[in-house]
Image (cartoon, rainbow, N blue to C red):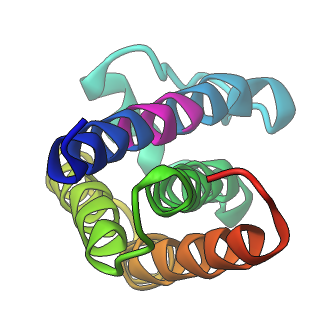
Amino acid sequence: MHPFLRNTLVTIAAIIAGALINGLIIQISPNIIPPPAGADLQTEQGLKAAMLMMEPKHFLFPWLAHALGTLLAAFLATRFSTFAWQGYILICGGIFFLGGAAMMRILPSPLWFTLTDLLLAYFPMAWLGYLLAKRSLKTSPIK
């Protein structure tokens, strides 16, 4: 298979895997940190209304979902591509960053969370995923 095609498919698969982890963490978060009493998290209007009632603890799992989804995508894209190119982490970090920014427009959040999320959950986690994958490439015979 041509390296460009392989790397493109690996990057797409990595982004899908990261998005699945993101969604899974978001799905389980209300079971671990219950939403505020009376909050309806099933609709966009309910989420917007609930944002005013949420405490900092309610933002932990959304941040983890964004950070770990990006980390996994960058790790997989770097680990399974034909060569560890930093462009893959820019693609993964950029896709997740755009998704996070779009979500912030749809569902406004407190400024502290918006800044923490956009500045720390995407490109830094993509870079960390890249570094972890490069380290695993040095220690693993698989490639």
Residue nearest the observer in this picture, 31 or 140: 140
| Residue located at (60% from left, 57% from top) | 59
Q: Residue at point 69% right, 69% down?
A: 137
In the rendered view, does 136 fall on the left or right side of 105?
right
Task: Give the percent coordinates (x, y) of residue 38.
Answer: 60, 22
Q: Quadrant of residue 37?
A: top right
Q: Which residues are magenta?
A: 15-21
Q: Nearer the viewer, residue 44 or 140?
A: 140
Q: Is residue 120 above or below residue 7?
A: below
As rendered, which of 56 and 77 lies closer to the eye? 77
For the N terminus, give its image quadrant. Answer: top left
Residue 12, position in %: x, y?
28, 38
Q: How many marks?
A: 0
Q: Residue at x 56, y 58 (%)?
A: 79
Please determine whether, in this image, residue 57 is positioned above or below residue 130. Answer: above
| Prevalent SS, magenta region | helix
Residue 66 in the image: state x and y as whole percent. Answer: 50, 55
Q: Residue at x 35, y 81 (%)?
A: 86
Q: Position of residue 60 (x, y in %)?
A: 68, 58
Considering depth in this image, is 56 or 70 the residue closer to the camera?
70
Indicate whether 81 appears above or below 18: below
- Magenta includes 134? no
